[in-house]
Image: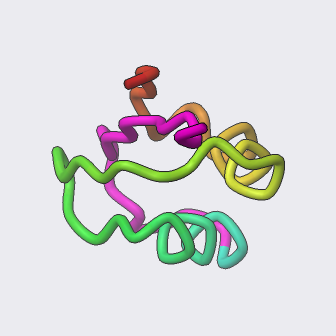
């Protein structure tokens, strides 16, 4: 079976955010505003997404 994927887009700047929130963006592979990446739907990725949900737009692929 293919693993589920999530499409994650960064909608707000990382400047002025908490250090661990910036690290979550880095862990998801996001560097620029409006950049979109696809990540595998794992509990680890979901935790990072939930922590910084106010900065992201998430869709299931």
Q: Nearer the viewer, residue 2 or 8?
A: 2
Q: Is residue 36 above or below residue 6?
A: below
Q: Nearer the viewer, residue 11 or 39?
A: 39
**Spot occupied by residue 4 in the image (x, y as percentages of width and height):** 56, 34
Q: Residue at x 61, y 77 (%)?
A: 23
Quadrant, the C terminus? top left
Q: Is residue 28 left or right of residue 29?
A: right
Check residue 50 for magenta coloring: no
**Spot occupied by residue 44 in the image (x, y as percentages of width and height):** 79, 57
So how many labels did they put on this image?
0
Q: Residue at x 47, y 40 (%)?
A: 55
Q: Is residue 47 left or right of residue 5?
A: right
**Spot occupied by residue 5 in the image (x, y as percentages of width and height):** 48, 38
Q: Nearer the viewer, residue 22 or 44?
A: 44
Q: How is the image coloured?
A: rainbow
Q: Residue at x 72, y 37 (%)?
A: 50
The secondary structure that dominates the magenta segment is loop
- Residue extending farthest front: 1
Quadrant, the N terminus? top right
Check residue 2 for magenta coloring: yes
Residues rendered magenta in the picture: 1-18
The quarter holding residue 15 reads bottom left
Q: Residue at x 55, y 50 (%)?
A: 40
Q: Is residue 29 left or right of residue 4?
A: left
Q: Is residue 34 left or right of residue 6?
A: left
């Amino acid at each position: 079976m293919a693993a589920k994927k999530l499409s994650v887009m960064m909608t707000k700047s990382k400047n002025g955010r908490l250090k661990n929130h910036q690290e979550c963006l880095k862990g998801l592979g996001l560097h620029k505003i409006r950049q979109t990446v696809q990540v595998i739907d794992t509990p680890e990725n979901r935790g990072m997404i939930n922590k910084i949900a106010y900065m992201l737009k998430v869709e299931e692929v």
